[in-house]
Image (cartoon, rainbow, N blue to C red):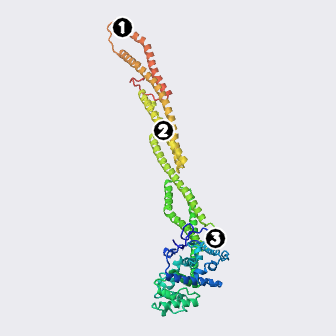
């Protein structure tokens, strides 16, 4: 089990644990660090190497005295002088620059334990979990005392060392490596063998104070001389007490790492002023560079924001414009422009918007990490303004696209209806061509009864055809009405044509009705005339036969030889004369039939046609 190591109360390692805890009156306010590797942990039951123990005792004593002398005191025996806890508490106050709880002044064992516990509680409050008890310190357990002091050294002398994002041991090692890198025969890889020949210490001194030694005269073959030179110069000129023994360093196969780390940390803190100045200069340059970069990012943000907002401002009226030439071709061209906008124009602007958001967040993070005030863009150019403007743009896009698709569907429907209208009108007009002339024709006025009856049957068929075409005319009117509702651009022409067809249709219906009446009346009249013609034929033929016989008899030559023959001729003539009245009446009746037929035709506007039943003329 480790004698001590950094760990929070919940067993978490690392810097994440920052919750305040209270232990022995001290707030647990420091995060736990995890820089101690397992080989650096103290094993309670393990036996400490005598050489290392001697080195640690000397080094830790010197380190403690380097701080205790600031308050006019010191220790001589590390395992005894901390037993009552008073100097331990004093040491902690000096190195932490904090006031600890007032110690107990009694000399009893429990007073000592109480004071040591106060010191241990204070150490624990700094994020260190100790596996050492106050009784072990009070009892003068050297191993536990050294372990406790090492923990204090780590926490207050090494933990705060930070070099390029590395801290504690790694940071101190990196600092040594960076400072000694230019020096010959120095290769710092650890805190034991790398410092054994003393050149690393001399290199550190020469790097910061080249006036104190001539490194070029040093050689790797004189480790004892190198170590003593470095220790003496450090003590005399740098106020770093001699914490290591040169003979121990040389004679030990592997010098104690903790002792070397403690001593090297004193170098680090001694040169901290120079290093901090270098760091400050580096930080200033870095801050100036960061500020310049931040200003450039601000200017670039303003430029990009202005450019994007201006582009949105120009595009919105175009997307909100609902003007159209009301043609399918024009609307398809608009849709092509919109698709080009979506494919070519918008994606770069979307990337620009994403870059603005990323740059803004990056800039704010950089400013926050630099403890600089947050960046506030000029009015109207905040990310929320850009997001709102982009939302408005996308709403306008959605509205424009929906309108375009509706308009396209409307115009496609219009185009289809217009073509359908033209087709139906063409068919109807082709069908109706000449129909008015036919219906207004007087052909029935010069027809025979058979021809008239044929015309009537033909007209009846036309009426059926007309009824069949009623649906097409209604469709034409319905299509024209829909074209009106949908706002067809050539609606005037459509309405004129539809009106012409409807008017013609009404006229056709009226003429059809009139022709049907006229044909019916004409058929009735012609039937009467036909009856007269038939009766005429029946009477005219016998009459003409009688007339021809009478004419023959009257002009016939006769030869008379006897008186009886004369008397017979006279009697026959008297009989003939007796029939003349009846013949005259028959003639008049026949002429009446012709006259009645002719008069009927004249009264009804019919042409008087020849008698189909007789070739005998009234004349």
Count of all numbered marks drawn on residues in the image: 3
Q: Residues within 10 Å of mark 2 (few under 14, many from 20)?
A: few
Say which of marks 2 and 1 sits in front. 2
Q: Position of residue 313 (x, y in %)?
A: 58, 64
Task: Note whether residue 447 is visible.
Answer: no
Instruction: Find numbered disc 1 in the image and state the secondary structure of the residue it sits on.
Output: helix
Q: Residues within 10 Å of mark 1 (few under 14, many from 20)?
A: few
Is mark 3 in CB contact (under 8 Å) with mark 2?
no
Gap between marks 3 and 2 measured at Cα: 105 Å
Say which of marks 1 and 3 sits in front. 3
Q: Quadrant of residue 395?
A: bottom right
Closer-to-camera residue (77/606): 77
* First reached walking from the N terminus: tag 1 or tag 3: 3
Q: Quadrant of residue 79?
A: bottom right
Instruction: Find numbered disc 2 in the image and state the secondary structure of the residue it sits on.
Output: helix
Closer-to-camera residue (73/393): 73
Q: Position of residue 568 (x, y in %)?
A: 36, 7
Q: Is residue 467 above or below residue 51?
A: above
* First reached walking from the N terminus: tag 2 or tag 1: 2
Is mark 2 in CB contact (under 8 Å) with mark 1?
no
Task: Note whether residue 254 is visible.
Answer: yes
Label annotation for residue 471: 2
Of all residues shown, which one is farthest toward the top? 564
Is mark 1 in CB contact (under 8 Å) with mark 3?
no
Residue at 57% x, 75% y: name it: 136
Q: Which residue is mark 1?
A: 568
Instruction: Find numbered disc 3 in the image and state the secondary structure of the residue it sits on.
Output: loop
Q: Quadrant of residue 132?
A: bottom right
Q: Position of residue 51 (x, y in %)?
A: 49, 83
């Amino acid at each position: 089990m480790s004698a001590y190591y950094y760990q929070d109360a919940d067993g978490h390692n690392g810097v994440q644990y920052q919750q305040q805890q209270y232990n022995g009156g001290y707030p647990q306010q420091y995060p736990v660090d995890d820089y101690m590797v397992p080989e650096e942990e103290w094993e309670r039951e393990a036996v400490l190497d005598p050489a290392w123990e001697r080195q640690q005792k000397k080094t830790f004593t010197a380190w403690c005295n380097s701080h205790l002398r600031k308050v006019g005191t010191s220790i001589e025996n590390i395992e005894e002088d901390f037993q009552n806890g008073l100097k331990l508490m004093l040491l902690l106050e000096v190195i932490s620059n904090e006031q600890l709880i007032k110690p107990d002044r009694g000399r009893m064992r429990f007073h000592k334990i109480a004071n040591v516990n106060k010191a241990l509680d204070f150490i624990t409050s700094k994020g260190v979990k100790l596996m050492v008890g106050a009784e072990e310190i009070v009892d003068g357990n050297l191993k536990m005392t050294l372990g406790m002091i090492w923990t204090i050294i780590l926490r207050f002398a090494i933990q705060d060392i930070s070099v390029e994002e590395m801290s504690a041991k790694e940071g101190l090692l990196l600092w040594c490596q960076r400072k000694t890198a230019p020096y010959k025969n120095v290769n710092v890889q650890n805190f034991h063998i790398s410092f054994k020949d003393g050149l690393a210490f001399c290199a550190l001194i020469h790097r910061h104070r080249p006036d104190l030694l001539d490194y070029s005269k040093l050689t790797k073959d004189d480790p004892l001389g190198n170590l003593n030179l470095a220790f003496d110069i450090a003590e005399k000129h740098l106020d770093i007490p001699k914490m290591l023994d040169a003979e121990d360093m040389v004679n030990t196969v592997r010098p104690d790492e903790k002792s070397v780390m403690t001593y090297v940390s004193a170098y680090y803190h001694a040169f901290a002023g120079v290093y901090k100045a270098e760091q400050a200069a580096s930080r200033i340059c870095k801050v100036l560079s960061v500020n310049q970069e931040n200003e450039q990012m601000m200017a670039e943000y303003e430029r990009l924001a202005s450019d994007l907002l201006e582009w949105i401002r120009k595009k919105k009226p175009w997307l909100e414009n609902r003007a159209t030439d009301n043609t399918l071709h024009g609307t398809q061209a608009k849709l092509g422009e919109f698709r080009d906008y979506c494919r070519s124009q918008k994606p770069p602007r979307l990337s620009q918007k994403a870059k603005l958001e990323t740059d803004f967040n990056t800039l704010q993070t950089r400013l926050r990490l630099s403890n600089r005030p947050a960046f506030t863009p000029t009015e109207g150019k905040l990310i929320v303004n850009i997001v709102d403007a982009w939302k408005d743009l996308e709403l306008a896009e959605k509205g424009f696209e929906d309108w375009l698709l509706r308009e396209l569907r409307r115009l496609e429907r219009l185009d289809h209806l217009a073509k359908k209208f033209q087709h139906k009108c063409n068919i109807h007009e082709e069908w109706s061509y000449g129909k008015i002339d036919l219906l207004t024709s007087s052909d029935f006025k010069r027809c025979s009864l058979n021809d008239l009856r044929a015309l009537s049957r033909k007209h009846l068929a036309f009426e059926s055809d007309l009824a069949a075409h009623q649906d097409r005319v209604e469709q034409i009117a319905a299509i024209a009405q829909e074209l009106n509702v949908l706002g067809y651009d050539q609606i005037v022409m459509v309405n004129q044509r539809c009106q012409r067809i409807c008017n013609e249709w009404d006229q056709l219906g009226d003429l059809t009705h009139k022709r049907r009446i006229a044909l019916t009346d004409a058929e009735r009249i012609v039937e009467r005339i036909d009856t007269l013609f038939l009766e005429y034929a029946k009477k005219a033929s016998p009459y003409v036969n009688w007339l021809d016989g009478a004419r023959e008899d009257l002009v016939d030559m006769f030869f008379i030889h006897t008186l009886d023959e004369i008397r017979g001729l006279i009697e026959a003539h008297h009989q003939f004369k007796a029939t003349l009245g009846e013949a005259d009446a028959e003639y008049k009746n026949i002429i009446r039939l012709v006259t009645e037929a002719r008069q009927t035709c004249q009264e009804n506007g019919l042409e008087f046609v020849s008698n189909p039943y007789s070739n005998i003329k009234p004349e």
